[in-house]
Image: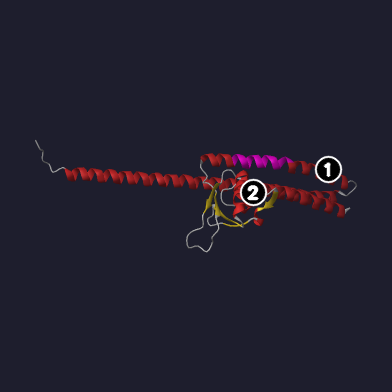
Amino acid sequence: MRQKVLGLIEEAKSQFSGYASIYAYRLENVCVKAESAALLSFNVEFEGDEYPIEQMANAWNPREDQYEIVPNDEEYIFPICKGMKEAHPEFEIEVKDPEEGSDNDSKTILVTVPEVDKNRRDTMMDAVDTLSKDIKPRIDAANEEYKVRLDILLIGETKERIDEAKKEYNKLHDTIKDYCKQCREQKEKEIEEAYQRYLEKQKAAERQHQEQQAATNLQAGMSMKLGDNGENDY
């Protein structure tokens, strides 16, 4: 009986872990920065077949918010851009010619994750909420099923063994719930921090503009004073 209980708990662990992995992967695709998961979220369609992007190109991150994609063939440029845009319409995509004097003579695709302004912040927070609402009932339904199956397995067992098995199962369920909660909180924190960085950048740009405007006005005022010698011409 003990082995059957352990087998059931292992089965539940596998299913819960699968749900949690899917949830974490989908949250990664709510991109604040250039996450590797975004490149795995689509296949490239070429000549009637579909290929993972790693078969069509090499990619790296020149900046935290950018991918630079080097297609294996220039024919792949449009299909890669199309696939990326369909998966992440918010990304900014630019095809760059090779730089003069560079050893690389191939065109590259530069993909930039946009800043998190107010609209993006709200959209991303809504996406996180939707993903969370989608995964919770799946975990809850699986939990109810495994609890019923565990109760059936434990029929006729001593109270001590029943309590031990349920404690072990509940620990597993709580671990998965806590993991999903941490994933959500981390993503929401990441989004909010990116939004605050955007606001600070905007404030800094506004201060710089005001300082430049004040300097321009001061220079104009001084020019007017220097041009006035105190004499009137009649």
Q: Residue 3 is drawn in which quadrant?
A: bottom right
Q: Secondary structure at mark 1?
A: helix
Visible in this render: residue 198? yes
134 part of magenta stretch = yes
Asked whether 234 or 120 is in front, the reply is 234
Precedes in sequence: disc 1 or disc 2: 1
Asked whether 67 or 209 is in front, the reply is 67
Disc ID at residue 198: none
Visible in this render: residue 167? no
Asked whether 204 or 157 is in front, the reply is 204
- Residue neighbourhood size for the residue with mark 2, other residues' Cα within 10 Å, grouped as few (<14), some (14–19), many (≥20): many
Q: Residue 206 is drawn in which quadrant?
A: top left
**Amino acid type indicated by mark 2:** Cys
Which range is magenta?
Answer: 125-137
Which residue of the protein is positioned furthest toward the right in this rendering?
A: 156
Q: Position of residue 226 (x, y in %)?
A: 18, 46
**Amino acid type indicated by mark 1:** Val
Give yes or no for contact between labels 1 and 2 (Cβ–Cβ under 8 Å): no
Disc ID at residue 148: 1
Q: Position of residue 185 (x, y in %)?
A: 61, 46
Magenta residues, dominant SS class? helix
Residue at 32% over, 43% down: 213
Residue at 72% over, 47% down: 19
91 part of magenta stretch = no
Q: Nearer the viewer, mark 1 or mark 2?
A: 2
Left or right of 42 in this view: 151: right
